Each structure stands twice: as C-alpha cells, then as structure tokens.
Amino acid sequence: MKKVFCLLLTLCMVLALAACGGGNGGGDSAPADSGSSAPADTGSDAQEPADASGELITVGVINNDPNESGYRTANDAAMRATFTEENGYKATFYNNNDAAQQIATAQQMVQDEVDFLLLSPASTTGWDTVLQDAQAAGTQVILFDRMLEADESMYVAAVVSDMPAEGKTAVDWLAAQSLDEYNIIHIQGHMGSDAQLGRTGALDEKVAAEGNWNYVTQQTADWDEATARTITQSVIDSGKPFNVIYAENNGMARGAVAALDAAGITHGKDGDVIVMGFDSDKWAFEAVLEGSWNYMGLCNPLQADTVDGIIKDLATGNAPAQKIIYTPEQGFDCDTLTQADVDTYGT
C-alpha cells in the first residue's frame, strides 16, 4: 500500500513518544481526497479505521452500470455496502458501461492518489496507460468481476469470474442434450467485455467444429432485454427454424422468451426451444426450477468481501495468497436444480 511505510514510521514515533512520557502528541490526519466525476458515498466516522494512523484507506471503484442487469445491481450494491467509512474506507464510486469513460475516470482517480483502484472493466483492452500510471503513483490495482488484458505484474490481485469456463460448462451441457441439429439464436452481451468474450468463445469453437451446430443469428443485445426480444422476434418473423436460445445473460434470455411466448412457441423442459441464460438472478433460477428455462450458468456477483480481505491483508503487510481468485460458480439445469439451490445461490 502506498502509505504503509509512512504509516509505520508514524506509529513508531507515537510509540516512542508514549514511552518517553510524552502526552497526547499530534492531531489526527485528514483523509485524502479520492476525486472523481461521481460523488463518493459518505457515512458516519469510521470506528475501526483500516490503517495504523487512523486514516481511512482511499479507494476508487470503477464498475459498470447497475441498471445493466440484476447481476450488476447485486454486484454494485455489495461493493457499496462494503467500502464504507464504518469499514475503514473513503470510497469514490463510478459506474459506466463506456470503457473510454471508465478509463478517463480511473486516470483521474490515480492522479488524485487513491490508495487502491478497484476495476470491473467494461472492455478487456485499453487500460495500459492507467495501469502504468497507477504503478508509478503507488496506487495498487485490484480487479473484480472481470479480467482485462494485462501482465499480472500490473495488478496486485483479481477476484473474478472465470468467463471462459462459464462458456465451456454451458456448451458442454448443451452438447450433452444430443440434439440431431443445433440451430442457435445467439444473443451476445457487451462486445469486448470479459463476460461476452468468454461466453461467446466456447460456443464459437463448437459451431466451427461441428457440422450440425449452426447459428441462425448471432447478434449483440448489449445486455438489454428489449433488444434481445427484438432479435428473437426478427428470427421468428423470418421463418427460419431454431431450437436453441443461448443468451449471455438472464435479462436477454427473458427478452427472448417474451418473444417466444407472444408467438406461441413452447420452450423449456417440455418445449420446442432450449433456453439458456447466465448470472445469478433468483427469478431466473425459479424459471429453471419450474422448467420454463433449461439452463442457467451461475456467475457469482459477490466479490466485495474477498476484495476487502485482500486490502486489509495488504495494509498489515501480507500479500494475497493467490494472484487470481475465481468466485465459485457452476451450471444448473431444470432436471437437477433444487429449491435449496435457488435459496442458496439466487440474488
């Protein structure tokens, strides 16, 4: 942590003064500004500050728009509930799905000398200058939720979902359904994001390798439910046959299902169309449980506690035990999902 050596020196001086009979020497230090275009959340004074001097740890949190999906809402809420003054932090939050805006704000946070920059990047590329400047400034970078393309030396830790593994698990499940032919409506998320690349990659490989796997359409809905419905409706109107909807998040799967329902097309366990989604929304788990959907790939949004633990360890001089920590995830289908799973994993 950027301030560790100064803080340790300060602590030693305080202890030395106390040993010499010095009274209450020195006043409290003011917490550093964390500056950003988005205001920081504020709370009551910290009761247990995270560093030895009594200063709050300053963090800049760059995340995606919480309105993007139920997953993102839960992810953003967990970060805001964790990085509070009560927990020893002065935090500034910025939410935007535009990578250029994220990068510009992150650059400002580095210039404002935050101790930690927490990143959920909207795009895997374009972050080299921010990472280099952060390293030069002594700002430690921790990735959460999503990876980016960078050498591991440029960030101190990553608490993320294994998006390629999510995609492979889903595609392996789909292959195990042993359809004579796979005619797939593939609805992609935000292009260039870690989630989109991972969930698309496995399916692209399978379609390229198997002669009976075909894309009826492959389009991005940019995580948007209404756009996914429009894409699906366009295929229905074209008369092209399809039997799989592979949507890269639950909101887009729900939009696709709305188009199926409007057209009287059956789906799910006993239907004509297999429906697949991703993330952790409880309502989507319930759709799988009732057999309206066939599959959901769990993507766990709750990384905040783990990131908090890493920062607290670094503040006491302990490096993370692992550089990259993957959140526990798995796939669930309508034949094996239980109510206990819904209660345990749904958000």
Image (tube, grey):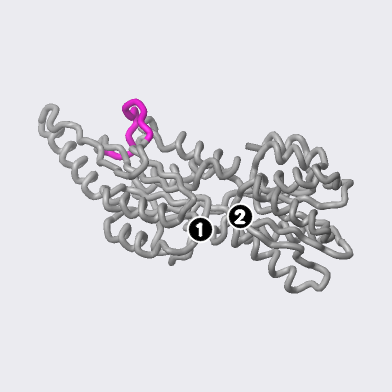
Q: CA distance from mark 2 to mark 1?
A: 15 Å
Quadrant where the C terminus is found in the figure: top right
Q: Which x, y percent locates residue 322?
A: 48, 56
Q: Is residue 298 visible?
A: no
Q: Give the numbered dot on residue 147.
A: 1
Q: Which x, y percent locates residue 257?
A: 76, 45
Above or below 100: residue 224: above
Majority secondary structure in the magenta region: loop
Q: Which residues are magenta?
A: 41-52
Tell me the element at label 1.
loop
- Residues under numbered marks 2 and 1 in contact, where contact means CB atoms less than 8 Å apart: no
Residue at 35% over, 35% down: 88
Type of residue at label 1?
Answer: Met
Foreground pick, 13 / 107: 107
Decide if residue 182 is on the left or right side of residue 68.
Answer: right
Mark 2, residue position: 189
Residue 42 in the magenta stretch? The answer is yes
Q: Earlier in the sequence, mark 2 or mark 1?
A: 1
Location of residue 234 (image quadrant): bottom right
